[in-house]
Amino acid sequence: MFKNKVAVITGGARGIGKVIADEFIKNGAAVCIIDKEPGPHFVGDIAEENILKTFVEEVISKHGHVDYLINNALPLMKGIDSCSYEEFNYALKVGVTAPFYLTQLLLPYFAPGAAVVNISSSRDRMSQPNTESYTAAKGGISALTHGLAVSLAGKVRVNSVSPGWIDTAFTEYTGADADQHPVRRVGNPLDIANMVLYLCSEKAGFITGENICIDGGMTRQMIYHNDFGWSFKL
């Protein structure tokens, strides 16, 4: 399906990013990964402008073009109780600035039919306490998605995926952990990878500017104490 296509993936050394990379490779694509983790990929911190420039130069030198950009790298998660000014800005650099700048750097090299998929989070619309740096970054990349989709109209389709609880070890849960989801299970990375590859395919050619939440229905539940088996413990 993706023979002779080139996919660039940030944060692709492990977790959801690695599964996305593996699925692209299985389907014939060449994959270029940048990650802070040591490995056979390009190793670097996407919060650094010069690192992004060097990475793009290497990708284009090797492949000459890019078909798909997957902005997946994970921003720092800290909250108002402990997050410093520098840490908050670092989270935004990884989660918002780098996706924007990578798209800008790659713009002259995107092939016809190119697509960008940003990995956001269900936390772009709901929160737990003391997670503001992560939530702000994910909210930012969701907004960036529709902004880029309009700016790049006719050139590149841009969409985002917002995962809910995704167990990157493919653990199978039972009981309340699974059953609290309307689909009665916890998600795994293939749930995200399958949607990413679909959004990059010609089958999704009429989709751009969208944010697709993949969370087993959790954000669609109305939850109140003592309703439908839910309870709140003080």
Image (tube, rainbow, N blue to C red):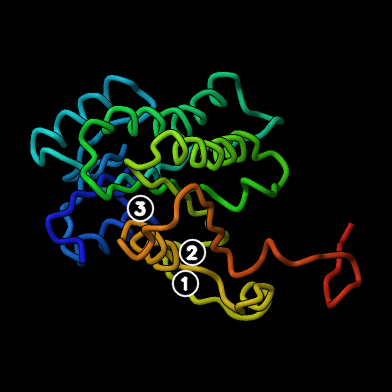
Q: Which residue carries the number 3 mark?
A: 17
Report x, y in % for residue 185: 57, 76
The quadrant in which the N terminus is found is: bottom left
Q: Earlier in the sequence, mark 3 or mark 1?
A: 3
143 horizontally vs 36: left or right: right
CB under 8 Å between callouts 2 and 3? no
**Residue 38 vs residue 5, the one in the foreground:** 5
Q: Please identify the residue farthest to the front as the structure is shown.
A: 154
Indicate which disc residue 219 carries. none
Image label count: 3
**Kind of residue sitting beneath label 1:** Thr
Q: CA distance from mark 3 to mark 1?
A: 17 Å
Within 10 Å of the Cα at label 1, are there few (<14), some (14-19), or many (20+) other Cα atoms?
A: few
Find the distance from the CA under tag 2 to the CA under tag 1: 6 Å
Q: Is residue 110 above or below residue 200?
A: above
Residue that label 2 marks? 167
Mark 2 vs 1: CB contact within 8 A: yes
- Reading the image, the residue beneath label 1 is 171
